Amino acid sequence: MIKNINKKGINMDKINKFIEKAGWPRIIIGIFLLILFACAPLVKLSLARSISDTLIRVGMNAVMVLALVPMVQSGCGLNFGLPLGYLAGILGALISIELNLKGLFGLLIAMGISIPFAIIFGIAYGALLNKVKGDEMMIATYVGFSSVSFFCILWLLLPFKSPVMVWGYAGRGLRTTISVQNFWQSALSDILSFKIGENFYFPTGMFLFFGLMCILIWAFFHTKIGTAMTAVGSNPDYARASGINIDKIRMLSVVMSTVLGALGIIIYEQSYGFIQIYNGPFYLGFPAVAAILLGGASVHKATIANVVIGAFLFQGILTMAPSVINSALKTDMSEIFRIIISMGMILYALTRKTKLRA
Amino acid sequence: MKEKFENNEDLNKLNFTKIINFIINFIKKVFVKYPVPVMFIIFLIVTIPASGFSWKYLINELFNRLARNSFLVLSLLLPIMAGMGINFAMVLGAMAGQISLILITDWSIVGLPGFFLAILLAIPISILLGILCGYILNRSKGREMVTSMILGFFMNGFYQFIVLYLMGPVIPIRNKLILLSRGFGIRNAVNLQGIRQCIDDLIPLTILKTDYDPGIKIQVATFFVIFLFCLFIVWFTKTKLGQDMRAVGEDRLIAESAGINADQTRLIAIVISTILASIGQIIFLQNIGTLSTYNSHDQTGQFAAASLLVGGATVSTATIGNVFLGVILFHLMFIVSPMAGKNLIGNAQVGEYFRVFVSYGIIAIALVLYAWKRFKEKQKEREATRFRELNKSK
């Protein structure tokens, strides 16, 4: 009897440690996700298909989630202004289509064109954020909103000519959604991709690219500048005392985040098959933020492990929950579900008591 | 004689340059103090003539929009006073107002009784939502604004769940006209025929009416309600609670050490703001006459915040004057942009996107200017302490 209790006690200790390490939200969502996968066959969903869908969506969104890491690490908080980076990516993608470039080459050119735009936007955005230390998150949100609505005007006025993109009857102004099907749809996903059976498709290319980006970011944070970035975020006074130019480092983190956002949206588009402009990118920053928070990041600290775990859990839930619920109840609740999960996660992170920093 | 004349000219010159300098200084001062309204007025000077609207039309529209929006903007004042910034979570109040409007439409209670019943129903819902919101904002001190915005988005999910799934099976709705054809959930648009403009038209008054011209309609009763509410705010700031609120807004820690329960004061500010927002939304919708079930509340917080900031308010100070100046300037821009865009650029859609851009951009600019100022003050303070310490060590 006593032995049993002891044994249980030891187990409880281990469990408690694990819970502490993983955090309640991840455990609850993780268990929920497992239940959903287990339920999938019961409501006549193919398990292979479900897993494949989840993986595709993880691949689509992972780079956008990764884009948040530099700014969190440098103390700029959650980058709600991520849509600014998306706009740079969309510009690159549209120019690539305008030039009628196809296949992987077209995709790479789109990325190549978007990077200088992203750097310019990032520098302006970073300069702004350096002027408003302490209020970054709110201002970032509104930088995102106002730049998206400003680009709405540009989409009407920019001199794009390609008939694929321009409204047919007016001859000017871009369409609200532009198909990339004839250009570079799945150009990246299909690299080394494979199918198992009828329903399982693995987009190897996207994961290779994501892996490459992760390694680059990981390597960056082990260089001198990368360490300086972490120092600026975790202890600005100490960083200043050791002669780090805080403003420059913060600016660099913002530029990195914006560039990754631009690349991220292009990857998203090549898998999704459409470029959404006008109000499309408006709320697209929030799911990325919710994902990294679900992965265990806080407003002050984020790692690549947070990105991977968060992207998988968040996209897993978003793919599985609606399809299981839809099949079970025969109604479409995906939109509501997405809002509640993503905003709830952000709300949780914002209200978590954090240690006050000097 | 000649000498005298020259002297005189000199004097004249001096006066002239003095006057010019004075004017330049004055403009500079106004611009530094009220950068956002000044930018807006310059913009309007260009676009109002370009839109080609008659002044009568503009004034008529303006009265309509003042009646429609002022109350919503006024509901933002108390949280600003309590130092919590702009309460973007006033959307919660708007949702409460909409739920009660759906209910009274279902019960087909029309006219003033319907209007007041809607307010009575909305108040308890918004008290509950306000307590929730206040509790959450007390847990996120220092970033209330971003939290309140996210809370608004979050509750929007719940609102949709209630209206789309619970209305019908859980909350009984008998009126088939407002239900979706599948038997539960509310339609995209609910016609508020029963209470349409019931307050606006209570005391009808139209001036300058001619045979060709509809004239200028003034919503006397609505403005009376708004006026009463302004009196309430003025009175409230003079009560003990109002003074506490201001003290908490100035410096929370000092207020706490003076024995004020800061958390509770902040909570009350948010609850009152939420209640007022729900009433504001009911006034707003009775003016419009149709409830767009899933979109009406979306932009409420956004436009109210933009109006207030356009009127020269900041995140920490806002007055009743800011509210009215802001509503006038912001909505003038709203009325004229599509036509001005059409006449200036040849595309009305540009004007429409432009006004959305301005409503977001103006908040961004106002937030940046405020944060920048505060940042600079902090820096100055830090330098001052450093200087003091340096002197001490010497």
Image (spheres, helix red, strand yellow):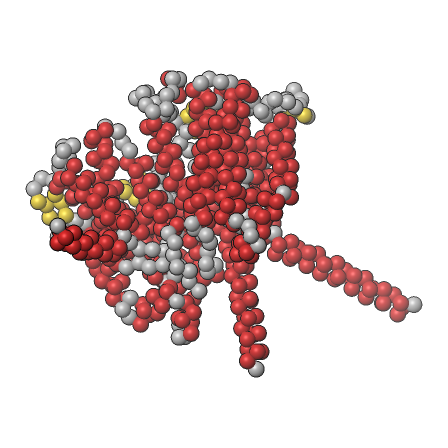
- Left or right: where B355 falls relative to A13: right
Residue at (54% x, 29% y) in the render: B283
Residue at (53% x, 35% y) in the render: B276
Residue at (57% x, 39% y) in the render: B74
- Left or right: where B72 falls relative to A30: right
- Above or below, A223 relative to A166: below
Which sits in the foreground, B56 or B8?
Answer: B56
- Left or right: where B392 falls relative to B163: right
What quarter of the picture does the C terminus of chain A occupy?
Answer: bottom left
Res. A72 image quadrant: bottom left
- Above or below, A99 relative to B91: below
Q: Residue farthest to the front?
A: A2
Which sits in the foreground, A180 or A201?
Answer: A201
Expressed as whole percent of the image width and height from the top left, the position of residue B37 reads: 59, 48
Expressed as whole percent of the image width and height from the top left, the position of residue A172 reads: 39, 41
| Res A9 seen here | yes
Which sits in the foreground, A166 or B186?
Answer: B186
Expressed as whole percent of the image width and height from the top left, the position of residue A122 reads: 39, 58
Residue at (38% x, 41% y) in the render: B154
Expressed as whole percent of the image width and height from the top left, the position of residue A208 reads: 18, 56
- Above or below, A245 relative to A272: below
Q: Residue farthest to the bottom?
A: B394
